[in-house]
Image (cartoon, helix red, strand yellow):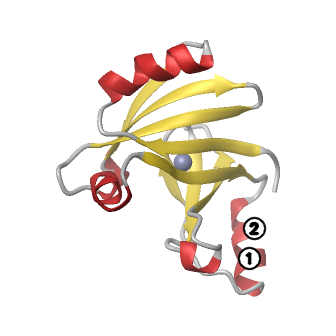
Amino acid sequence: MNKIEHIAIAVKSLDESIPLYEKLLGTPCYKKEEVESEEVNTAFFKTGESKIELLESRSKDGIINRFIEKKGEGMHHIAFAVDDIIKEILRLKAAGFEFINEEPKRGADNQLICFLHPKTTNGVLIELCQDAPII
Ligand code: ZN
């Protein structure tokens, strides 16, 4: 795996959290994107080689709101950049890791993504992502 691509933080409200993170990081939000497949609105900040991704639920009972109800706002997942997502999935499956989705899907910010199941990664939700601009 390559660098940490992004760290994602579950928030109740992007409107409130974007100015907070702009102040914290000293850098403007460079992109907002709706990801309907994941029922989330996202906002991105550049921090060196990596990004911070804020996640807000698009619906009352969406994944992010259910996460916040259980655990409160906070870190949701860590994403690692990979060159070949299919190859990494096969490597990790052979090593005994379980996936939430084994078929990569299109995520925010021009990435192909998949998630490992946190039960096989010490409770941390881990995302793999491969740059895949829409041509
Ligand atoms: Zn992510």
Q: Residue at point 57% right, 55% down?
A: 113
Instruction: Look at the image and tell me whether residue 117 can be seen.
Output: no
Task: Measure how far apart labels 2 and 1 are at the Cα level.
Answer: 6 Å
Determine the secondary structure under disc 1. Answer: helix
Q: Is residue 58 left or right of residue 104?
A: left
* Circle 1: residue type: Leu
Q: Eyeballing the image, is 130 above or below 34?
A: below
Specify the quadrant that holds the N terminus: bottom right
- Whether residue 106 is visible to the viewer of this picture, yes or no, is yes
Within 10 Å of disc 2 (Cα), the crowding (few <14, some 14-19, many 20+) is some
Disc 2 residue type (three-letter): Glu
In x, y percent, where is residue 101?
Answer: 50, 71
Q: Position of residue 103 (x, y in %)?
A: 54, 69
Check mark 1 vs ligand 1: CB closer than 8 Å? yes or no: no
Marks 2/1 in contact by CB < 8 Å: the verdict is yes
**Residue at (64, 73) in percent of width and height:** 122
Task: Tell me the residue that label 2 is attached to.
Answer: 88
Would the CB of label 2 be found within 8 Å of ligand 1? Answer: no
Q: Which of the two residues, 77 or 75, is positioned nearer the viewer here?
A: 75
- Point out residue 97 in the picture as x, y percentages from the top left corner: 67, 81
Q: Please state the total of marks drawn on the protein image.
A: 2
Could you say where residue 57 lies in the image, as x and y percent from the top left? Answer: 29, 45
For the C terminus, give its image quadrant.
top right
Identity of the residue drawn at 49% across and 41% down:
108
Residue 92: image tag: 1
Residue furthest toward the right?
2
